[in-house]
Image (cartoon, helix red, strand yellow):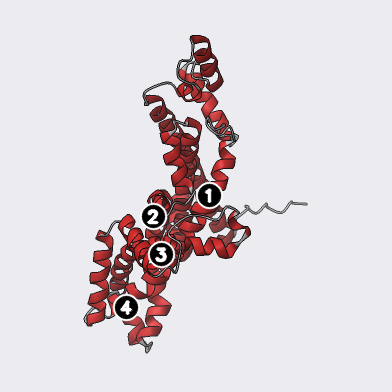
Amino acid sequence: MQKPALRPWVLHPSDERKLTIFAYVLRRLAILILSLLIAAVVLFVLLRLLPGDPANALLSVGADQQQIEAAREQVGSNLPLWEQFLRFVGSLARFDLGTSFVSGKPVVEEIAARLTVTVPLALLGFGLAVMIAVPLGIVSAVKANRWYGAAISTVSQLGIAIPVFWVGILLVTVFAVNLRIFPSGGYPRRGWQNEGQVLYALALPVLTIGLVMAASLIRYIRSATQDVLGSDYLRTARALGASFSQALIRHGIRNGAVPIVSILGIELATTLLGAVVVERVFALPGLGSMLLLAIEQRDYPNVQGVLFISTLLVLLIGFAADLLQRMIDPRLRERATGAAT
């Protein structure tokens, strides 16, 4: 009896699409890991170019040669550079950032404690900026011929030119010194055990970040909305009977959100890195303050730990923004699928 011919195994189109998207995600993860490795190399080289030996941070004035050699052996600066680098990368792979020269505590624990200040500060400021910028940016584009549309654009341009520390000082002067509504700075010692006190202490810093970031975002949202208003698909939707609001909500917002997501990722990363200024103005014990203090004390493990974690957060934000763009826009998904195949 003749055996039936074997049918070639063929993937369903939906399964094939999932596999290619999965391959794209894996490729992006590989790029993320490679970027972290490059960042580790740059960080290692820059810290080794600083004048002086890292072991000096452990020594007191007048240390003898025996104490100097013991300190160098403790921090590993007596080893060849290639061996120091292998130890450094191996520690990062285990997520071991070392021990602080000054406090003697693990760097990971100190960074985790500081992130409980920096991350809520950045996220709350980012959320406030989005709530302010999205409606005002759309209004300034839709009503560009009205006086309030032009006024929003003008105020946003002025807001971009104002330094963040000046905004913080102005808010402290008005709301803390004159009106005495909010504290001028500081952070509760018990941290998030009392959420009300924490939010009360973060009110002015969050408002500072939100206002400065919103001024920048309004410009981008206004530009994206203007591109949507002049698009063919919006005119087609209007011609098919949809009202202006319906056409804008159903077709315009999704298309306009694609470039905005990239800008939002950049702004969020910038906020995390630039929080040091706001933390200084309001005396907050965040990640930026930790970095400045570590530089002043020449605490190398804390310096490299903060820089590495900051780089990791920025790369993760960019990775998430890239994936979110492809979830919003099917054309980008098809482009990713085509690239993967």
Q: Which mark is residue 139?
A: 4
Of residue 129 and residue 169, the one placed in the foreground of this image is 169
Q: Which class describes the residues within 10 Å of circle 3: few (<14), some (14-19), or many (20+)? A: some
Looking at the image, residue 305 lies above or below residue 257: above
Q: How many numbered badges does the structure rendering display?
A: 4
**Label 2 to label 1: alpha-carbon separation:** 19 Å
Q: Is residue 105 left or right of residue 179?
A: right
Identity of the amino acid at label 3?
Answer: Ala
Residue 148 left/right relative to 51: left
Callout 1: SS: helix
Q: Are marks 3 and 2 in contact (CB under 8 Å)?
A: no
- In this orientation, which residue lies closer to the viewer: 258 or 338? 258
Q: Amino acid at mark 2?
A: Ile
Q: Nearer the viewer, mark 3 or mark 2?
A: 3
Circle 2 packing at 10 Å, graded few (<14), some (14-19), many (20+), is: some
The reply to whether discs 1 and 3 touch (Cβ–Cβ < 8 Å) is no
* Amino acid residing under circle 1: Leu
Q: Position of residue 126 (x, y in %)?
A: 43, 62
Is label 2 or label 1 in front? 1
Q: Secondary structure at mark 3?
A: helix
Quadrant in which residue 311 is drawn = top left
Residue carrying label 3: 176
Counting residues from the start of the chain, the first of labels 4 and 1 encountered is 1
Residue 185 sits in quarter = bottom left
Who is closer to the viewer here, 16 or 300? 300
Q: Which mark is residue 266?
A: 2
